[in-house]
Amino acid sequence: MIVACATLIIALDTSFMNVSISQISADLNTDVSTIQMIVSFYTLITAALILLSTKLQDIVGKKKLFLIGATLFGIGTFVSTISSTDTMLFVGWSAIEGVAGALMVPAIVSIISGTYSGKKRTIALATLGIMGGLSNAFGPLIGGVITTFLSWRCAFAFELIIIFFILGMQNKIPNFKPTESKKDLDIIGAIISSIGLVLLVLGILTLTKDVTASISEIILGLIVLAIFIWYELKRKRSAKVPLLDVDLFRDKNLRLGASIKLLYNLTLKGGLFVIFLFFQTALQLNAFDTGLASLPLTIGLLIFTLITQN
């Protein structure tokens, strides 16, 4: 439950932000496109560092990396709460929380998988899935209520309280010894993968602004990622530890699971971002009405989350 709370706030972080875009832009005296950019860069930074973070947990230790990420998340949340300008919000939310999210996400599942086995592991992972599902379901509604009747800053403050809970209960999380040393860190692979992911995600995020430039970035990103795969295969053949063991994708279940997760994020999270933006800009709905409009989605996600995790 302690590490699942991290999943809760990471999911809430994005969902409440989506319904609060108009209010945040008004309070910080900026425009909607700037807040969109801040949201996009949060995704960009997390994506760029996720592979490196996955390897760092083997070198630093799962628990230690998770707690570092939680601490950074708390700092980023505090900066976001007191933000008086869009620059402060970018630093706190996009930069610091983006890095923190990348550090925590891989460690969450690793800690659970390393702590439990058999049926208990299944129950623990199901609990993790339920927490993520419920936060995705209720995030827009809760965010709309908090933003309208209190302030969007209170949503960040709520996340900070959960971070204090996680750090206060850290002794309950078992320690895991590092399985690799610093010399095993694939620095070159980390740089290549980060560049490839940044180009790919940036190209997708800016697709509506300059189609030619965006497609060029996407193609270049795919080329760089292809180079990354080639480099990782070469490194493994040289008996060195790769940043990503590409041979893992020979596993049918892994390929299927990753594909389903990709489709889920593209359709649900990507679609919701566009829908909530339409509600606030085209229909001029406030945060509460935007959250209320998501109620059918909330009910559907709640029902099917409980069914699939049963």
Image (tube, grey):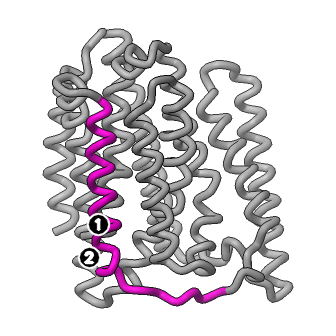
Question: Whole-percent x and y of residue 273?
Answer: 40, 31
Does the CB distance between marks 1 and 2 fall below 8 Å?
yes
- Which residues lie in the magenta part? 152-180
- Residue 277 quadrant: top left
Indicate left or right for 268 with 300 as reference: right
Looking at the rendered structure, the kind of residue marked 1 is Leu
Q: Nearer the viewer, residue 37 or 206?
A: 37
- Residue denoted by label 2: 124
Can you give x and y, in whole percent of width and height, for residue 88 in the image? Answer: 52, 31
Up-down: is 283 above or below 7? above
Amino acid at pointer 2: Ala
Please give the name of the residue rendered at 21% of the width and 63% of the height, measured from the top-left corner. Answer: 308
In percent of the image, x 56 and y 75: which residue is there?
57
In-image side of 197 versus 258 (left or right): right
Which image quadrant is residue 12 in? top left
Give me the C-alpha separation between circle 1 and circle 2: 6 Å
189 relative to 287 in the view: left or right: right
How far across and how far down the image is residue 279, in percent? 31, 18
- Please give the label number shown on residue 66: none
Residue 170 screen position, x and y as percent: 34, 74
Residue under the image location 44 percent in, 56 percent down: 261
Query: Would you call the spot at circle 2 few (<14 residues within 10 Å), some (14-19), or many (20 or more)?
Result: some
Say left or right for 125 vs 35. left
Whether residue 114 is in magenta: the answer is: no
Badge 1 element: helix
Q: Would you name the residue on which mark 1 appears?
A: 128
